[in-house]
Image: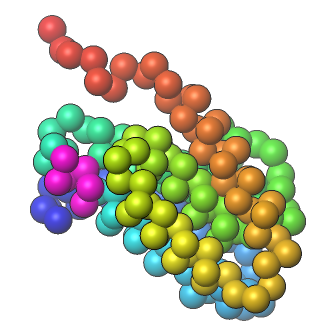
Amino acid sequence: MSKQSCRASGCALAATLITLAGCGDSANDPVIERTRADMAVAWNERVIAIADAEDHLLTLKGVRTAAMMHAAMHDALNAVHRRYQPYVYATDTPRANPVAAAAQAAYEVAVSQYPGKRADFDAELQLWLASIGADRRDLDPGIALGRDVAMAVLRQRDGDGWDTVAE
């Protein structure tokens, strides 16, 4: 990945890492402790690599996708452990698994923008869902939350003119 690619997605990644760092009581939840920053970084790297391969970030589609993805991850985590002002999704869902919620939110946004790379995103999602472990009671609510949050973020950005040709 180029230095320009890294800089372009740095702000969105930083915001998500701050949210992930504050999510839950990490001393009592080893899953959150192990995956906090790793998840945001992994999804960011995957999306930016796909974007760079597609258009070298010349259209800003990849940077926009990363920003929407991180906003969705933030709101998904924030719905489980409310600590910050939400971007678009303000419903509390404390019984949802935060890892499942954030991973599903990232997945839904990424697939919506790069449907031809669904298999790559499927593999990333399965990696994070598998990391949850044996106690999966809160998995389904986490997945549902992630989907709902991603759709809210995508609706918010629909028609935002990101791909309008400048005069």
In percent of width and height, residue 41 lies at: 40, 70
Q: Is residue 23 left or right of residue 127?
A: right
Q: Residue drawn 19% across and 53% down? A: 52
The quadrant in which residue 47 appears is bottom left
- Does 61 lie within the magenta span? no
Is 143 placed above or below 24 here?
above
Task: Find residue 132 and report its horizontal and vertical position in percent.
Answer: 67, 81
Q: Is residue 81 visible?
A: no
Looking at the figure, which quarter contains the C terminus?
top left
Image coloring type: rainbow
Seen in the image, is 80 located left or right of residue 70?
A: right
93 lies above or below 67: below
Frontmost residue, 83 versus 74: 74
Which residue: 29% across, 24% down? 163
In the rendered structure, the answer to whether residue 70 lies left or right of residue 4 reads right
User: Hey, which quadrant is residue 165 in on the image?
Assistant: top left
Which range is magenta?
49-54
Residue with the most extreme top position: 167
Rendered view: 51 above or below 139: above
Residue drawn at (58%, 38%) of the image? 153
Please name the predominant secondary structure of the magenta segment in the image: helix
Label count reads 0
Can you see residue 70?
yes
Whole-percent x, y for residue 30 in the image: 68, 90
Which quadrant is the N terminus positioned in? bottom left
Is residue 53 in the magenta section? yes
Horizontal and vertical percent position of residue 85: 68, 47
